[in-house]
Image (cartoon, rainbow, N blue to C red):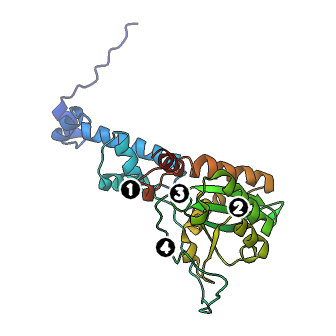
């Protein structure tokens, strides 16, 4: 039995467009469309911005990403970077500022504020700032991180982690900082709050032996020590608040990786002309 041929109707482009209610002009525009170089570059920038953003632990905003793009030769305006970040839903993480309650105006002559919110410096090891922050672990409860930061390089020059918030914790941190830095004793000031660890006779005797002057924040005024407060805020919003820590040991490893692996070594600072603390310190040593 011979096969029956079925001839399907053939339509011209005009007829097909009429049947589909599709404008011929749109058809030809779509058919002949080529992606523009501008759009291709826009897509490339999206990839680069996303990469830089995630490499920064999702903390860099448009100004820092704009700087890195131009440094690596991918030229884009700040407004374009901001626009692309909005399109991608990327933004720098922020933490609401802690606002202090009522402060006392009582003058405590034995606890002098030598810095008085003057964070200007001209070289390394002129002014150090220190503080303790609380970090929770599931099995070991609250643990405590003591840090010392050099105001010139923004580098965390020493940090110690402990299950107890004692004077010894602060002394260990001080010993670690003094042991690794080339200090000029007569010019060095260490600034802290008025916590009992820092006002203790043991801690101040250690400073006296090292010929380091001690400066104190006013009671209830964290703005007197804003740089180290800012570091601890960054640590928590970029690392601590994102995870749950099983115990002291696991958190100790994580803190070391964040401080030494990321913050000192890879996190750029606009106040350091977009250098990392380690890069800035090295340039000071070789200058």
Question: Between disc 3 and disc 2, whose residue precedes?
Answer: 3
> Is residue 36 visible in this depiction of the protein?
no
Report the residue marked by disc 4.
Answer: 118
Is disc 3 surrounded by few (<14), some (14 to 19) or many (20+) residues within 10 Å?
many
Disc number at residue 47?
none
Label 4 neighbour load within 10 Å: few <14, some 14-19, many 20+ = few
Q: Nearer the viewer, residue 255 or 48?
A: 255
Distance between the Cα atoms at labels 3 and 2? 16 Å
Determine the secondary structure under disc 1: helix
* Number of residues whose C-alpha sits closer than 10 Å to that of mark 1, classed few (under 14), some (14–19) or many (20 or more): some
Residue designated by label 2: 174
C-alpha gap between disc 4 and disc 3:
15 Å
The answer to whether residue 155 is left or right of residue 202 is: left
Query: Which circle, 2 or 1, is nearer the viewer?
Result: 2
Between the C-alphas of marks 4 and 2, the distance is 22 Å
User: Picture quarter containing residue 3?
Assistant: top left
Where's the N terminus, which quadrant? top left
Q: Which residue shows up at 23% across the image and 39% down it?
A: 19
For disc 1, the marked residue is 63
Residue 283 coordinates in the image, percent (x, y): 47, 46
Query: Which label's residue is closer to the chain start, 2 or 1?
Result: 1
Q: Which residue is mark 3?
A: 124
* Mark earlier in primary sequence (3, 1): 1
Element type where label 2 sits in the image = helix
Distance Cα–Cα, label 3 vs label 1: 26 Å
Judging depth in this view, the residue of 265 and 101 nearest the camera is: 265
Q: Is residue 226 above or below residue 125?
A: below
Vertical relation: 87 (above or below) 98:
above
How far separated are the C-alphas under marks 4 and 1? 26 Å
Residue positioned 63% across, 84% down in the render: 219
């Amino acid at each position: 039995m011979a096969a029956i041929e079925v001839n399907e109707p053939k339509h011209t482009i005009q007829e097909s467009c009429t049947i589909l209610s599709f404008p011929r002009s749109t058809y030809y525009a779509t058919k002949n469309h080529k992606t523009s170089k501008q759009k291709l570059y826009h897509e490339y920038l999206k990839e680069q911005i996303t990469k830089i953003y995630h490499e920064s632990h999702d903390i860099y905003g448009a100004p820092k990403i704009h700087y890195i793009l131009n440094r690596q030769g991918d030229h884009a305006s700040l407004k374009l970077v901001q626009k692309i970040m909005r399109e991608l839903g990327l933004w720098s993480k922020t933490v609401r500022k802690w606002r202090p309650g009522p402060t006392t105006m009582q003058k405590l002559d034995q606890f002098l504020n030598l810095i008085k919110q003057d964070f200007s410096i001209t070289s390394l090891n002129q002014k150090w700032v220190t503080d303790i922050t609380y970090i929770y672990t599931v099995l070991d409860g609250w643990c405590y991180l003591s840090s010392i930061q050099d105001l010139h390089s923004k580098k965390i020059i020493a940090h110690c982690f402990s299950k107890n918030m004692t004077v010894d914790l602060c002394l260990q941190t001080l010993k670690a900082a003094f042991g690794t830095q080339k200090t000029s004793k007569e010019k060095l000031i260490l600034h802290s709050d008025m916590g009992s660890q820092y006002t203790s006779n043991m801690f101040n005797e250690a400073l006296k032996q090292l010929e380091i002057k001690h400066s104190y924040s006013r009671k209830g005024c964290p703005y007197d020590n804003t740089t180290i407060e800012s570091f601890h805020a960054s640590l928590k919003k970029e690392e601590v608040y994102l995870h749950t820590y099983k115990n002291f040991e696991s958190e100790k490893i994580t803190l070391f990786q964040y401080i030494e692996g990321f913050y000192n070594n890879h996190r750029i600072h606009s106040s350091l002309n977009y250098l990392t603390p380690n890069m800035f310190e090295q340039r000071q040593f070789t200058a």
